[in-house]
Amino acid sequence: MATEPLPAVGELRILLAVAREGGFSAAATALGMTQSAVSHSVRTSERKLGAVLFERGRKGATPTAAGEVALGHARRVLRLLEVMGAEVRGAAGGAGGAGTLSGPLRIAAFRSAALHLLPPALERLTARHPGIAPEVRIVREVGRGTAGEVLDGRADLGIATIGTTSPVPPELIGGVLLEEGYALVHPAGHPAPRSLPLVDWVENCTSYTREWWAAQEWLPPATVEAEDDGAVLSMVSTGFGMAVMPELSLIGAPSSVEITDLGTERPTRSVGYVTTPELGGSLAVRALIRELRAQSGRRAG
């Protein structure tokens, strides 16, 4: 029995254009094609995959649940082809066959990792491989977070929080880079910092701190939920309240705040990386992971 072939590369590009442009007509204009050709290509892909990929309506085309899955795979497939081309060209042009790394390297990271963990690693990476062009996107580590960006094919590697309650998704591979503890942060010199209102932000209210948080009778419910950890630190520095924050968020904290250790029972979180099994074998991603591990080792030392 003959098996229906999967969508071709050109068909994948058309699917992504329809999703990106929000409709068949707009995708056709962007691709320099006729609308009928785009529609035919999408119908062909739907027949090959056995599912409706877009909801058609007066306002355009919206990916279905099956479409979102197809789009994620399409991005990953096309990205692998780009990586293949870059690595083959690098191997052909490299001295002694050693190869030269070049091209974009797409990274998704939550805010404190993007500010304090990535920069020195990327500085060393690009010094060793000037042809690599890092593209960093800051993604809130809530919901699907940075791992979702990798799964959807929008990032080659994500800096993520990893733990028993937030494990590496089964479709991805990853590893822990560092363990960071939490500390109490309050206005410097305050005589009774634990009496202050609690300031928090949504990314901090995750499952790896929830059990510890619930057991602390001295911690009141958060009075203010700020946009991010930088806003929390700013509020604390002006005397607005206290906060419980992870170490990466406290790098470069102003002298107007005081950081108090919470002892051996303090909560911690694991910060690591996630990538796809295919991209995990690519030269650029492997080189970045090495630099991230080296940077994490320097921090731990």
Image (spheres, rainbow, N blue to C red):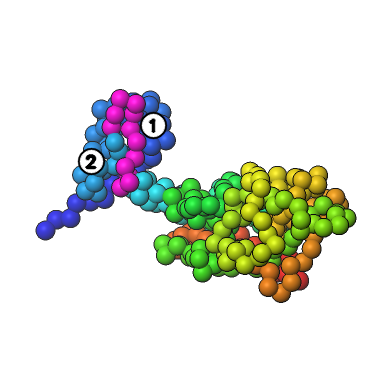
Say what secondary structure mark 1 lies in: loop
Spatial CA distance of label 2 from label 1 is: 19 Å
Q: Nearer the viewer, residue 273 or 134?
A: 273
Give the labeled residue for mark 1: 22
Q: In the displayed structure, would residue 268 be above or below residue 23?
A: below
Instruction: Please indicate, yes or no, whether residue 5 appears anywhere in the rendered image.
Output: yes
- Residue that appears at 79% across and 57% down: 193
Residue ranking furthest to the left: 1
Q: Residues within 10 Å of mark 1 (few under 14, many from 20)?
A: some
Residue 284: x percent and y percent? 56, 58
Q: Residues within 10 Å of mark 2 (few under 14, many from 20)?
A: some
The three-letter code of the residue at mark 1 reads: Gly
Residue 246: x percent and y percent? 69, 60
Say what secondary structure mark 2 lies in: helix
Q: Nearer the viewer, residue 139 or 123?
A: 139
Q: Which residues are magenta?
A: 56-67
> From the viewer's perspective, is 50 left or right of 237?
left
Which image quadrant is residue 44 in? top left
Residue 172: x percent and y percent? 45, 62
Give the labeled residue for mark 2: 44
- Residue that appears at 33% across and 46% down: 65
